[in-house]
Image: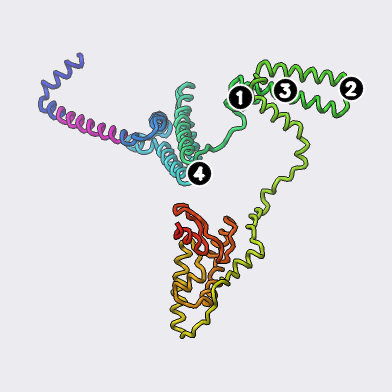
């Protein structure tokens, strides 16, 4: 009886059971739909922002792991004799261990930039699963297939780890010494740089000219016979003719400079013997000391008492009043130094209301401080001005004012 007739007969004979089975099937289909939609959403969320090759690697590795698990299912039933729930619980323990080791290895790589012992465990467990699956094969082809499936999954995992390692560290694990590119460069079939064929040919022809010229010069210095000299000159002329013809040496200034550079390097090879390069692990050379001012200038910078001002006897003041005057004079001095202006003793005396002798005494001490002394020395270096208190004003525009000494810029501003 056809299946459709059997189904119709069952529905006619058992209507209640048919309704119950239909409701259960409908509920299961709805649950399967929602579960599938949730899985698709999770997969899309996981794949968002990931490179396509990483997603394909995970998918292919999952398929290969499923093939390996199917082989272990048959092995646990045919060889080990597991059946029922026991077989369902124990058949894929190696695959679970492989996945666990792979997750741990990836975490180790992100934290320590190395898969560690877990990376070795992934390959060891994969090989074990492949061997056990192939032992229950019914043919050689099936055995090869069951051996290949776990190894493919492990290889895809390894390549994904390598790509992520390069992405994190910026470098690969090793650089092979024997690669197709290195072999082609070694035999002369490939070029290391990105030069064009014409540039490579021009460089070789110029090098031939330089080497031929060096050969002629060496023979001439050694006093070679005329026969050798004529042969060397013939090779030089031939190389020069080809360079002029094929490289444009006669009109190309860059090629001419390149040829002269090669000849200069080849002619002065012996100069390398007399070179004294710096020792890389030696102490660093000390920076040169700044040029010191002449002794006479330093004496004038220090002894700059304004002799043209009349000396006044210093009045007798108490300690509190003297401290107040000193504090006021110091504040005035700091303000003017901040404006890059070194006040004179007369300026201090006029501002604070103290005798000129006291102002000279205080100024002689303050002008030796680093900031004030730097201004005085800069005035001498830039303008040749010595701090005597009697030099003329420096005409400096207001927007270009850099340094003023002894009220020179202020005097110039007042004069304008």
Indicate whether 402 appears above or below 206.
Answer: below
Indicate whether 136 appears above or below 121.
Answer: above
Tell whether 327 sits left or right of 279: left
Q: Nearer the viewer, mark 2 or mark 1?
A: 2
Looking at the image, can residue 62 be seen? no
- Considering the numbered disc 3 on the image, is that residue within a helix, a strand or a loop? helix
Give, as a single range, the part of the protein colored magenta: 22-43
Q: Residues within 10 Å of mark 4 (few under 14, many from 20)?
A: some
Q: Could you tell me which residue is drawn at 71 percent across and 45 percent down?
A: 277
Q: Is label 1 in contact with label 3 (beta carbons under 8 Å)? A: no
Q: Nearer the viewer, mark 3 or mark 4?
A: 3
Q: Residues within 10 Å of mark 2 (few under 14, many from 20)?
A: few
Where is mark 1, residue-wise?
A: 191
Residue 225: which disc?
Answer: 2
Q: Could you tell me which residue is drawn at 51 percent across and 82 percent down?
A: 314
Spatial separation of the CA atoms under disc 2 and disc 4: 70 Å
Q: Could you tell me which residue is drawn at 88 percent across and 24 percent down?
A: 224
Nearer to the camera, 257 or 84: 257
Where is mark 3, residue-wise?
A: 208
């Amino acid at each position: 009886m056809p299946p459709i007739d059997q189904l119709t007969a069952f529905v006619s004979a058992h209507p209640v059971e048919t309704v119950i089975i239909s409701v259960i099937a409908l509920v299961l289909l709805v649950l399967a739909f929602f579960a599938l939609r949730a899985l698709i959403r999770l997969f899309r969320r996981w794949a968002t922002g990931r490179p396509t090759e990483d997603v394909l690697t995970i998918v292919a590795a999952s398929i290969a792991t499923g093939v390996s698990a199917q082989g272990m299912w048959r092995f646990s039933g045919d060889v080990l004799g597991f059946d029922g729930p026991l077989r369902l619980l124990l058949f894929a323990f190696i695959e679970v261990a492989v996945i666990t080791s792979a997750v741990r290895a990836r975490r180790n790589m992100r934290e320590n930039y190395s898969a560690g012992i877990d990376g070795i465990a992934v390959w060891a467990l994969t090989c074990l699963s492949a061997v056990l699956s192939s032992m229950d094969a019914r043919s050689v082809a099936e055995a090869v297939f069951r051996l290949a499936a776990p190894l493919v999954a492990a290889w895809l995992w390894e390549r994904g780890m390598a790509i992520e390692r390069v992405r994190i560290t910026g470098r690969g694990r090793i650089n092979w010494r024997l690669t197709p590119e290195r072999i082609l460069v070694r035999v002369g079939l490939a070029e290391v740089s990105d030069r064009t064929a014409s540039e490579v040919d021009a460089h070789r022809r110029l090098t031939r000219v330089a080497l031929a010229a060096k050969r002629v010069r060496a023979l001439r210095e050694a006093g070679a016979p005329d026969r050798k000299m004529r042969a060397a000159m013939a090779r030089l002329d031939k190389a020069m003719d080809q360079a002029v013809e094929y490289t444009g040496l006669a009109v190309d200034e860059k090629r001419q400079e390149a040829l002269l550079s090669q000849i200069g390097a080849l002619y002065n090879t012996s100069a390398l013997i007399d070179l004294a390069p710096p020792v890389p692990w030696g102490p660093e050379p000390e920076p040169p000391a700044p040029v010191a001012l002449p002794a006479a200038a330093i004496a004038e910078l220090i002894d700059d008492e304004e002799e043209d001002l009349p000396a006044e006897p210093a009045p007798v003041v108490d300690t509190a009043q003297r401290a107040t005057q000193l504090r006021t004079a110091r504040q005035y001095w700091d303000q003017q130094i901040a404006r890059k202006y070194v006040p004179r003793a007369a300026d201090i005396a006029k501002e604070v209301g103290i005798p000129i002798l006291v102002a000279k005494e205080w100024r002689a001490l303050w002008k030796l401080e680093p900031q004030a002394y730097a201004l005085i020395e800069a005035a001498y270096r830039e303008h040749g001005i010595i701090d005597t208190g009697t030099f003329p004003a420096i005409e400096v525009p207001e927007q270009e004012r850099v340094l003023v000494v002894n009220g020179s810029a202020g005097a110039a501003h007042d004069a304008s």
